[in-house]
Image: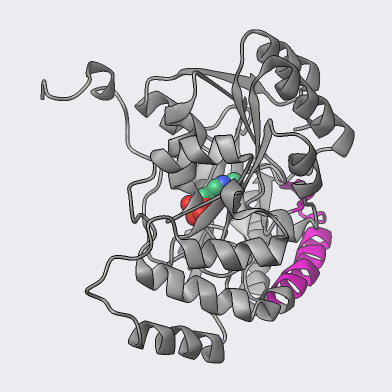
């Protein structure tokens, strides 16, 4: 196909393969659907919408609600169907992209798709932040730096002082530090104060995790108005569907349910971490998210053995520094119990 840019020919697809399993712990989703009354409110809103009309150009109603909730100016906000799309928009606008290895794969994938200059800086062996190497990479030219915090897929939360150093370097060099806060509710971290002071810091958020809206597709960017104007131009006009807006308005009016879910998942996280530390052959990393990264002797065997027991997890062993690793989302208590039983049973099989 000569109509397409040549570099796209060798590009592989996004690394995800759908597999059916009774216990689905592979996508870091919320294991709980929305409370019925919130769903009913959203459906009521949908019923009163004019489906024949286009939605607002830039999701104005949602931005107004978010702006009130976060005390953040509407001009510093872009709402889109999933934060993945915001990542793509940011990359398309950028001269240079820097991230960490490993990191959430859509940063690198977007950079390759857009043929934007891309550099990955390896995390330290214990997954701590390679601050000096990142500062060095930022010195080399104004860069858009993606840093998930808490980090995906390692689950680490980086020290505030390190993040402040990167933010300062972004300001000094004219770059942009994008803190991807997809999992921030699970670590109680929030860099809005830093982004308010420093226009070279932007925050990415998603409704797919703690809000339990993975299927609805919604995320937002908080950034300086001049950043948002550029990013907004890369999102198609009328980009947020009216039905997505209706659902977001309903959840933003009744956000309390998310706290209950987060509390339940945090309690589960503590118990699972304690249990997994007793595993004879697996090493579990501490998590500040709703998932665990686990190093096993053989990721393919762990994945297949769990799947045999009806439990779907995600292999991570193809990423830099993650040999033997699988990623496991925290599910409902009964699902987590089943996972733990299967995990310990696997070690018995391999020892027999
Ligand atoms: C760190 C990180 N950023 C962004 C996303 C994308 O989220 P969304 O569902 O809003 O596209 C994910 C999804 O797993 C993620 O883990």
Indicate the position of residue 166 as horizontal and vertical percent values.
Answer: 77, 26
Coloring basis for residues? one colour
Q: Is residue 276 above or below residue 226?
A: below
Residue at x-position 70% and y-position 34% = 199
Q: The N terminus is located in which quarter?
A: top left
Q: Is residue 347 visible?
A: yes
Q: Is residue 301 above or below residue 81?
A: above
Q: Specify the segment rendered in magenta.
A: 261-288
Indicate the position of residue 279 as horizontal and vertical percent values.
Answer: 76, 54
Indicate the position of residue 334 as horizontal and vertical percent values.
Answer: 64, 79
Question: Could you tell whether 161 is left or right of 337 in the image?
Answer: right
Q: Nearer the viewer, residue 32 or 350?
A: 32
Q: Is residue 60 above or below residue 327?
A: below
When asked about the image quadrant of residue 45, the answer is bottom left
Would you say residue 319 sits in the magenta stretch?
A: no
Q: Residue at the far top: name it.
A: 140
Residue at x-position 67% and y-position 59% = 290
Would you say residue 286 sits in the magenta stretch?
A: yes
Indicate the position of residue 202 as horizontal and vertical percent values.
Answer: 65, 39
Residue at x-position 28% and y-position 18% = 7
Question: Could you tell whether 291 is left or right of 273 in the image?
Answer: left
Question: Could you tell whether 258 is left or right of 59 in the image?
Answer: right
When asked about the image quadrant of residue 349, the answer is bottom right
When asked about the image quadrant of residue 93, the answer is top left
Q: Nearer the viewer, residue 71 or 169?
A: 71
Question: Could you tell whether 132 is left or right of 293 in the image?
Answer: right
Residue at x-position 42% and y-position 90% = 44
């Amino acid at each position: 196909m000569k109509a397409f840019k040549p570099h796209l020919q060798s590009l592989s697809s996004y690394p995800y393969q759908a597999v059916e399993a009774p216990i689905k712990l592979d996508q870091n989703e919320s294991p709980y659907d929305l409370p019925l009354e919130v769903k009913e409110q959203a459906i009521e809103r949908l019923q009163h919408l004019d489906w024949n009309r286009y939605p607002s150009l830039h999701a104005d109603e949602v931005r107004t609600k978010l702006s009130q909730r976060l005390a953040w100016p509407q001009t510093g906000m872009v709402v889109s169907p999933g934060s993945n799309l915001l990542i793509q928009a940011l990359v398309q606008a950028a001269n240079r992209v820097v991230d960490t290895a490993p990191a959430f794969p859509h940063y690198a994938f977007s950079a390759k798709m857009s043929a934007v200059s891309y550099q990955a800086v390896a995390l330290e062996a214990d997954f701590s932040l390679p601050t000096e190497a990142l500062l060095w990479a930022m010195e080399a030219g104004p860069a858009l730096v993606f840093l998930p915090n808490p980090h995906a897929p390692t689950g680490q939360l980086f020290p505030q002082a390190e993040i402040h150093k990167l933010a300062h370097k972004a300001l000094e060099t004219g770059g942009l530090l994008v803190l991807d806060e997809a999992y921030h509710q699970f670590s109680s971290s929030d860099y809005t104060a830093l982004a308010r002071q420093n226009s070279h810091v932007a925050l990415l958020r998603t409704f797919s995790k703690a809000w339990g809206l993975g299927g609805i597709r919604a995320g937002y960017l908080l950034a300086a108005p001049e950043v948002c104007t550029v990013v907004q131009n890369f999102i198609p006009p009328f980009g947020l569907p009216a039905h997505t807006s209706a659902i977001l308005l309903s959840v933003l009016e009744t956000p309390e349910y998310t706290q209950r879910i987060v509390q339940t998942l945090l309690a589960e996280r503590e118990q699972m971490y304690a249990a997994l530390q007793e595993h004879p052959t697996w090493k579990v990393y501490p998590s500040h998210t709703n998932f665990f990264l686990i190093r096993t002797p053989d990721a393919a065997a762990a994945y297949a053995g769990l799947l045999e027991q009806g439990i779907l997890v995600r292999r991570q062993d193809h990423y830099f520094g993650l040999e033997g690793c699988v990623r496991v989302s925290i599910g409902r208590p009964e699902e987590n119990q089943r996972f733990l039983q299967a995990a310990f049973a696997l070690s018995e099989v391999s020892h027999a």
